[in-house]
Amino acid sequence: MNWIDYLGLLGVVTGSLTFVPQVYKAWISKSVGDLSIWTVLILISNVAIWLVYGILKDDFAMELANSIILTLALVMLYFKLTFKK
């Protein structure tokens, strides 16, 4: 691996961490009332497109980052659909 690969992996870590606090807060509070379902659906669509792009480009960092963020976004969608307001 060269420094560019490490930079990409650092981007994976920081990019993936941006959504973790929101998922954790929603899980603990069992509340996502203020979260727009449209925001979550747009995020899922965006990340899914980037994931496919990363797969087609054979870019491991992009695949990993978008897989993690897609998983977190799907968890938020699940919370949004199941938690009572």
Image (cartoon, grey):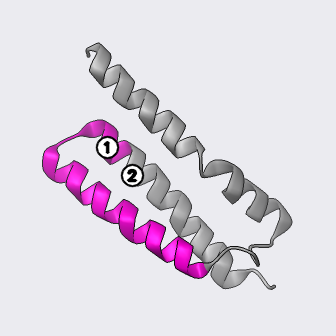
As shown in the figure, which amino acid type bears the numbered disc 2?
Answer: Asn
Which of the numbered marks, if any, corresponds to residue 83? none
Task: Please tell me which residue is depicted at 54% across the width and 80% down the height of the picture.
Answer: 38
Task: Please tell me which residue is depicted at 31% across the width and 47% down the height of the picture.
Answer: 63
Quadrant position of residue 81? bottom right
Quadrant position of residue 45? bottom left
Nearer to me, 43 or 29: 43
In the image, 23: left or right of 46? right
Q: How many marks?
A: 2
Q: Is residue 64 above or below residue 31?
A: above
User: At numbered mark 1, what does the secondary structure look like: helix, strand or loop?
Assistant: helix
Task: Please tell me which residue is depicted at 46% across the width and 50% down the height of the picture.
Answer: 68
Alpha carbon of mark 2 to alpha carbon of mark 1: how far?
A: 6 Å
Q: Badges 2 and 1: C-beta atoms under 8 Å apart?
A: yes
Residue at which label 2 appears = 66
Residue at which label 1 appears = 62
As shown in the figure, which amino acid type bears the numbered disc 1?
Answer: Met
Q: Is residue 83 magenta?
A: no
Where in the figure is residue 8, as x and y percent of width and height? 35, 30
Magenta: main secondary structure equals helix
Looking at the image, which residue sits at the far top? Answer: 2
Label 1, residues with CA under 10 Å away: few <14, some 14-19, many ≥20: many
Magenta region: which residues? 37-64
